[in-house]
Amino acid sequence: MDADQPPVNTKHWFENAGLRALIRLALVLPYATRVWFFGAVMRRVIAPLVGYKQRALDNLGLIWPDMPVPERYKIANQVSDNAGRSLIENYSTKDFLSRMAKIDPIGPGVAALFEARAKGQAVILVSGHFGNYEAARASLVARGFAVGGLYRPARNSYFNDHYVRTMEAFGGPVFAQGPRGTAGFVRHLRTGGQLVLLFDQDVRGAETFSFMGRPARTASSAASLALRYNALLMPFYATRQPDGLSFTIELEAPIPESDAATMTAAITASLEARVRAHPEQWFWIHNRWKK
């Protein structure tokens, strides 16, 4: 083996190989069938096997201890199904972009976004792992926005390599968390670009904010960057509809400028309201409330 190459992680290699085979199989199917198929595979096989379903059940019990167990199982299954659908949608670049191009964003943030672009002001679009956030980016790309994104690299580097390519295929640059990615992220802001940032995962060393009634370490970097580069900080959501294929894409009003902590609390409260209204849409499979 070349000394400059990282060692092979056999477990990760086989996990990625199996997932890639499923993705290739699904992509042969008609669009609606493939989305249904991958949601079912995630719900029935992958989520129980790798522990996602149990983590969702544990998190639901933590936040809503009085919720009946059957209701927790129902939501955990819906969450797993949504995760599977979102994954294969993001690999269905041509079909997904075509469908999302037909969905007009709504909400008070739409006018603010177009106004910011007209005057060259940067916009940081913030959301959580809710619905399929890439649906909103695809809709905006279809309307001429070069929306970039900042992402946390997956632990499985084999999977990460091709998943990053799917994000890039949507249009707009994507940047990995870290010094190099942050530098690119900042350059895009300085030129008046639009960027997507998801802020709802645990970040070691970050300040603690209340989320769903429990303390959760939450990065305030989105608010800090917005203040530093005079960018609008705007919550957005792509909520999956009952047909399992379409979305409502909403841009909320920009968060009023104050300080990073206050603005981070505001976007956290915005996401919390969405999760309470549609708990089946949020990724309870993440380890959000680490001790």
Image: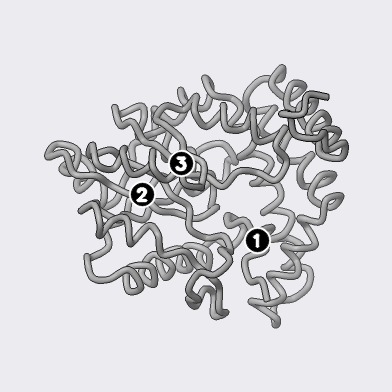
Q: Which residue is mark 3?
A: 181
Q: CA distance from mark 3 to mark 1?
A: 27 Å
64 or 257: which is nearer to us? 257
In the rendered view, does 255 fall on the left or right side of 51? left
Residue drawn 69% across the image and 58% down it: 285
- Disc 2, disc 1: CB below 8 Å? no
Residue under pointer 2: 125
- The amino acid marked with disc number 2 is Leu
Mark 3 vs mark 2: in front: 3
Q: Does 270 sit above or below residue 226?
A: below
Which quarter of the image is occupied by the N terminus?
A: top right
Q: Are marks 3 and 1 in contact (CB under 8 Å)?
A: no
In this rendering, the count of numbered labels is 3
**Element at badge 1?**
loop
Q: Is residue 110 above or below residue 87?
A: below
Q: Which amino acid, mark 1? A: Trp
Question: What x and y, as percent, mark residue 28?
Answer: 71, 17
Q: Which quadrant of the figure contains the C terminus?
A: bottom right
N-terminal label among 3 and 2: 2
Give the residue at x 83% y 51%: 50
Circle 2 sits in a helix, a strand or a loop, which is it? strand
According to the picture, the residue beneath numbered tag 1 turns out to be: 284
Estimate the spatial distance between the alpha carbons at disc 2 and disc 1, rounded to whole Å. Answer: 21 Å
Q: Which residue reaches farthest front? A: 3
Q: CA distance from mark 3 to mark 2?
A: 17 Å
Of tags 3 and 1, the one toward the viewer is: 3
Tell me: 154 left or right of 125. Answer: right
Mark closer to the chain start, 3 or 1: 3
Q: Categorize mark 1 by other alpha carbons within 10 Å: few (<14), some (14-19), many (20+).
A: many
Give residue 47's position: percent from left, percent from top. Answer: 79, 50
